[in-house]
Image (cartoon, rainbow, N blue to C red):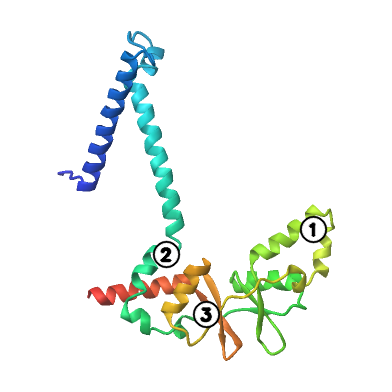
Amino acid sequence: MERRYSPEAVRAFALLLGVYFIICGGLLGLYYLGLCKFAVNLTSIDDVIFSLPMMALYLLVFLSATAGYARGKYMLKELPLNMRLKEELHLRTMGSASIKTKIRAGSQITSADSFADALNNMVSSRISILAVVDEQNEVQGVITPTDLLLYVQKLMKNNEDIKSLHEARVSDLQPSEPTLIEASDQLQSVTEKMIQHQYTKLIVIDNGKFSGTVDALDILAELLDNQTVGSS
């Protein structure tokens, strides 16, 4: 079977090879200037390890690893919904699509509910965000698994008995300020809000009342569907 390499792989190999010879030339220049020394008589494994070709290889690996780390950090910063979604946000299908079909059944609690209620609610519903509502079902805040863990950490730092969790209320967890979207919002505006706040889930309200949640994975699925339809 004939093996073919992509043009990108060939260019990357040629670039690395070129950089390797440049490093060798630079080290050789430093050697003749008396600024560094290398093993010349390769009679032992130590001589090979500290020879000029091997030192150049070490530097090449270091530079490649540094470049890879820098690129990874850049991609990590850009990838959470930024790159792909920003490209797709301008599609007409995205501009006209409603969020209503993407609303998931959510879960809500009140500030008077217990810590155990919040934990059991998350586990049973398998939703990592809980809406804290009042008697009119209006959203007052949100609770996430991080809030639960931070409260436990606070007790441990203060050397308090973990059994006091049974007495803790949702209000003790200091629910976060909710980032809300309307059930009538368009996918484009919802996606922009997710990008802005770096959230993967948002609370949905309808006429001021809690309605459910929307997940970034559902929006990504919508984007892929739009791309499939557009390319067919």
> Which amino acid, by three-letter code, is at mark 1?
Leu
**Residues at circles 2 and 1 in contact by the CB criterion of under 8 Å:** no
- Local packing at callout 1 (Cα closer than 10 Å; few below 14, some 14-19, many 20+) is some
Q: Residue 104, image x and y in percent?
A: 52, 79
Q: Is any atom of residue 58 visible in this view?
A: yes
Classify mark 1: helix, strand or loop: helix
In this rendered view, identify the residue nearer to me: 91 or 101.
91
User: What quarter of the picture does the N terminus occupy?
Assistant: top left
Classify mark 3: helix, strand or loop: loop
Q: Is any atom of residue 199 visible in this view?
A: no
Q: Earlier in the sequence, mark 2 or mark 1?
A: 2
- Give the residue at the far left of this rendering: 2
**Which residue is disc 2 drawn over?**
82
> Which amino acid, by three-letter code, is at mark 2?
Asn
Question: Which label is found at residue 23?
Answer: none
- Local packing at callout 2 (Cα closer than 10 Å; few below 14, some 14-19, many 20+) is some
**Which residue is disc 3 drawn over?**
104
Number of dots carrying numbers: 3
The alpha-carbon separation of the residues under discs 2 and 1 comes to 37 Å
**Which residue is disc 1 drawn over?**
155
Q: Earlier in the sequence, mark 2 or mark 3?
A: 2
Q: Earlier in the sequence, mark 1 or mark 3?
A: 3
User: What residue lies at 41% left-to-right and 54% top-to-bottom?
Assistant: 75
**Residues at circles 1 and 3 in contact by the CB criterion of under 8 Å:** no
User: What residue lies at 27% left-to-right and 77% top-to-bottom?
Assistant: 229
Left or right position of 143 against 103: right
Residue 161 occupies quadrant: bottom right
The alpha-carbon separation of the residues under discs 1 and 3 comes to 34 Å
